[in-house]
Image (cartoon, rainbow, N blue to C red):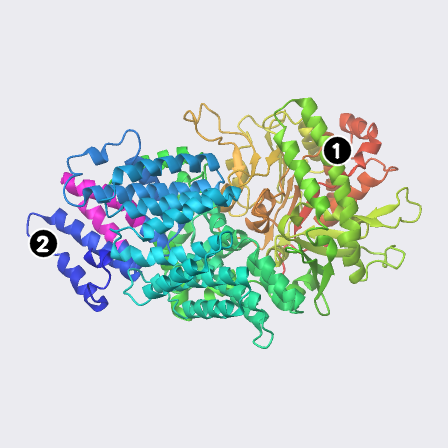
Amino acid sequence: MLELEVPGTVRTEDLEALVNQVSKGPAGEEAETTMRAAMSRMAHGVRTGDADRLAEAAELIGTAAGTGSGRVDWMAGVISPGLLAAANTLGGNLTDRDQARARLDALFGPASAVFDSAHATGPGAEGLRLCTRSMHLQLRLNEALDERDAERLEELLDELLDLLEEAGESSEWQFLVLFLLGQAQLSLATLDGGIPALRAGVAYFEEAANHPRLPAFAQPLMDAQCAPLLALFSMIEPDPVRVSEAVTRARRALDGPASTPDQRVWIRQGIGMALLTIHRSTGDHSDLEEAVGELEQARRELTERTSPAIRQKLLWELAEAYRLRDDRERDDTGAAVATAHASLWVLAEDVLLQLGAEHGLEVARAGASRGLLAAHWAAVDGRIEEAVASLENGRGLVLRAAAAAAGVPEQLAARGEAELAEQWRTAVRDLPPQAAPSGGGLAPGIGGGTPDEVRSALARVRAAPGVEIPSRLRRRALDVLRRDSGAAPLRGLLGAPGIGELREGLRATGTDALVYLVPGQDTADGVAVLVPNAGEPTALALPGLGAPGREPLERYLDAGARRSAVSGHGMDAYAEAHRHWEAALEGLCDWAGPAVLAPVLDALGVRAEDGSPQHNTPVRLVLVPCGNLGAVPWHAARLPGPRAGARRPYTYACEHAVISYAASGGEFLRAARRGRVPAGERAVLVADPSGDLTWAQDEVSALRTAYYTTALLYGWHQDAPENALGTPEDVLSHLPGGPAAPAVSLLHLVVHGLAGLRPTDSALHLAGPDPEDAPEPEGAPDPGRLTVTRILDVPAGERAAAGPLIVLSACETDLSSRDHDEALTPTTALLARGATDVVGSRWKVSDSASAALMVVFHHHLTVAGLAPPDALRAAQLWMLDHDRHPVPGLTGLLLAETQSDTGGLARIVSWAGFIHQGNPAPHAPAEGRQP
């Protein structure tokens, strides 16, 4: 412990012997000796970055706790949150952090008397309380910032001021409270851009750095933090002398002993950030050169024990520094792109280390937009292959990790680690539902629930004083994969496809081109990256995708946000907001054609000079829209120039092309490798269990009568069996790898859907279990919500070569409200679970219009024998045709409704919301293909 407080007291080579010596003790004091051994191993792990030492400490705490010694049990309960937090900091996963948070909530909850205990006395007890309380406040600050909750930050600021007064100037730990006050003020400044909060934050950091009782181990941390902060503040209130002194202090810290294995790396990182900030303010090139030098040296000092968070952030800062320097003789663009790829690779591994989609997404957010930026750097320099690699490495990290996780057990078993492989398979299944977090704190995992409910449940589950480190399993597994052949196994699982592999997939599926749509950054134009199935890929500059050109998209998104905001304010307010939204949708489609799709189709040689189709058969495209471009219905883009004899002065993109969508080229390839099963073989139809979708029963009845007479029925339908409620468990059981093997051939759900900010919010609304069979405790989360998290986190068994068609006849089942480049929606999650094709929706479509389109879709699928993307296009063209004729499946009230609303069916809002993701082939064999 002395080595932690005063680094350099013990030589590194002597630490091992000292730890072993401390682990010995007299007879009769076994529990106390074991606890000392645990604490020494914890200290050793923090000092050296050895995560195995932390795991040993956890086991020893479990051995010592519960032996009858009240003092030992008290110590176990108080230090275990720090052990878990340390595991997270040293490259563990976020489940470590969340279990630490749950324990801290219990320690400082209103019913806790831990620090009033007789054991909470003696030397160091008050310091332990202050440190533990500060750790609790730190985690809560991080959560509030991530959720952009300024009100909660203000409340935490008040708590910190109270704690500062409690600590008093005589406490050696008062600096820690000052540090957190600085963090709280900077968090507030981040949310509102307030200069007073920034000024207050810098002042608190300086006070912490200059505290008269600042412990030796904390000095380098304070110096490394102050340099970039003062440089940032100097852009508002210039003070070059003060900044120069801070950089000098940080450099001095490099000469002292390190208290953590990453210390020199993050000191150099802080110096580099300060110099970059000064350069951006003054334009002095020498500061930029010096910054690049510091960051390059920090990169050289990275070790295998450097945490992923530090590694990926440092690499990205170095990539941006290269880009800023932009020296063509030193090929700074190439260095920037390559270093960005290295950063994204570290991030991808870290996402795979997490347990569950929620934690994966939280980690992936650190890389938001990095792939887009790197792609822009490469594309404008003519490096098309590197641009594609940037896009593939930066998109859909959670979906990629989900696919990779399914392949890890096979890789482990091949290396003789059968037991570890089985533990990996069951880790998510055995994880308590409450342990999967979101948004910087805790949130529901497999079962849902609010953060407070989650922490309360965790506190109950983990009430015993023992502790285990959740990240140990995945860390061990990834170490095994690296051990035998470097990163090759992981690259095989996580690696992004190259141009050649994408071309092969396009040719195998009969697809003409894969098109990435990339929004412009700052003042730059956007880009379409075209990967044809033959010939060289190209980058097409599109001013319409630059920030000024995207105004119609911003208006559309703003109109959607306003419509959502007034949803509970009465029918009149909602109707007015909906009219504005629909007008914005029309404007969006007017923009999407001339600005984007017309130039793309022209570049691909699809249209003649007059705008008419160049060929008799439609071109087949897979679109990968990046950023918030994923909200656009590109198949409904209006292209200048009418078809012969048409009533409209424009055509829609879907009249020229069969368009499928993909979260990334990698996701396209995964679906393209799967075969199809005839839809009628094992069909399952789910009618809205809530009973409030007016046409749900009619839609399901029409489909069953006309096309799927042997289909299983679930939900609110007169012919559904009494116990076929249509619960999430019912649906999951029929997915690939579920217990109802073989999986369905078709799963058609007529249910409510909602796009949320997190995977636990984006959900299909199904039935809960019968309350008599499984009564839910009061305040429990809705068990009828099938969230993206539940879909992805349920472990699947062996995946078949062919997958089902899943149709989500529901609102907002293919829309991301946040984290657009992760593209986590029910549609993409179901593809990740093994579907070959999924039809989802970007917005809520009128019940009757949706029911009519779905009947026509299934007619073309089963009677005309079209593949899902072609059948959807045919149904949408039918909706657009004012002279349409009803298909045989449209009967009764549904037929009468469609015949009375001939004009309404052709409105964009009625047909363009539905999209196809998955295998774009016109036909795919049942055994699957291997493009």
Image location (x, y in percent) of residue 563: 66, 32
Q: Residue furthest left?
A: 27
- Crowding around mark 1 (Cα neighbors within 10 Å: few <14, some 14 to 19, many 20+) is many
Q: Residue at x 52, y 65 (%)?
A: 321
Prevailing secondary structure class for the magenta stretch in the rendered image: helix
Residue sticking out furthest to the right: 645
Question: Would residue 885 be counted in the magenta stretch?
Answer: no
Q: Nearer the viewer, residue 245 or 486?
A: 245
Q: In percent of the image, x 63 and y 28: which residue is there? A: 566
Dot 1 falls on a residue whose secondary structure is helix
The quadrant of the rendering that contains the C terminus is: bottom right
Q: Which residues are magenta?
A: 55-84
Does 202 sit above or below residue 20? Answer: above
- Kindly tell me whether residue 870 is visible in this rendering: yes
The three-letter amino acid code for the residue at tag 1 is Ala
- From the top left corner, tell me how far across and down residue 880 is, in percent: 82, 40
Q: Residue 227 is drawn in which quadrant?
A: bottom left
Hey, what amino acid is under mark 2? Gly
Residue drawn 18% across the image and 38% down it: 120
Provide the secondary structure element on which disc 2 rests: loop
Q: Is residue 884 above or below residue 60?
A: above
Regarding residue 511, the answer to whether it shows in the image is no
Residue drawn at the location 93% of the way across and 46% of the way down:
645
State left or right for residue 537 relative to residue 101: right
Point out the frontmost of discs 1 and 2.
Answer: 2
> Could you say which disc has been placed on residue 68 in the image?
none
Q: Position of residue 837 (x, y in %)?
A: 64, 48
Mark 2 residue crowding within 10 angstroms, few (<14) / some (14–19) / many (20+): some
Q: Quadrant of residue 268?
A: bottom left
The residue labelled by disc 2 is 25
Q: Answer with left or right where residue 68 lies relative to residue 511.
A: left
Residue named by callout 1: 849
